[in-house]
């Protein structure tokens, strides 16, 4: 009898927890990140802005321009927050292209490509 009551309480708490977490609007993607070559400095991005390597910006295939994205380098745990202002990357398996400044912050300059986790809040 006591075990049954504890089981019921556990199930109720578990269901409550799951219902609260399903309301979360945070999205996570995993994949590879690369960074822009220097030849893109000064060129127009898909949003119409001028690209600058010393900005904290990124390219993503589908996120709305202006979306803030936290990029975490899985190999070292370093992270940076960037703003999406361009489209790309166009290489298979890559989820985001970073400015050189952002790539430096997460320690991926020497490798050129890094496995990352990206997190962002989905806009309504």
Image: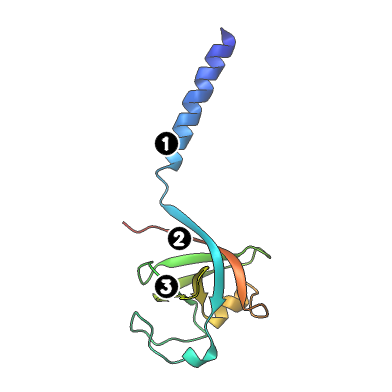
Label 2 residue SS: strand
Q: Which residue is mark 2?
A: 120
Label 3 residue SS: strand
Tell me if mark 1 has few (under 14), some (14-19) or many (20+) residues whose alpha carbon lies within 10 angstroms of its own: few
Res. 42 mark: none
Q: Residue at x 53, y 13 (%)?
A: 5
User: In which image quadrant can residue 100 be found?
Assistant: bottom right
Left or right of 41: which side holds 62?
A: left
Distance from the alpha carbon under mark 3 to that under mark 1: 31 Å
Q: Which residue is mark 1?
A: 19
Residue 19 pos. (x, y %)? 42, 36
Distance from the alpha carbon under mark 1 to that under mark 2: 20 Å
Q: Which residue is mark 3?
A: 84
Residue 66 pos. (x, y %)? 37, 71
In depth, the one of 95 and 43 nearer the eye is 95
Tell me if mark 2 has few (under 14), some (14-19) or many (20+) residues whose alpha carbon lies within 10 angstroms of its own: some
């Amino acid at each position: 009898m006591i075990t049954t009551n504890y089981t019921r309480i556990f199930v109720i708490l578990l269901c409550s927890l799951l219902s609260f977490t399903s309301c979360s609007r945070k999205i996570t993607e995993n994949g590879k990140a690369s960074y822009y070559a220097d030849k893109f400095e000064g060129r127009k991005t898909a949003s119409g802005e001028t690209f600058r390597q010393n900005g904290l910006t990124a390219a993503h295939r589908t996120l709305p321009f202006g979306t803030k994205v936290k990029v975490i380098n899985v190999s070292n745990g370093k992270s940076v927050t960037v703003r999406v202002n361009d489209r790309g990357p166009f290489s298979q398996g890559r989820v985001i292209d970073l400015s050189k400044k952002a790539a430096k912050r997460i320690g991926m300059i020497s490798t050129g490509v890094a496995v990352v986790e990206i997190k962002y809040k989905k806009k309504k």
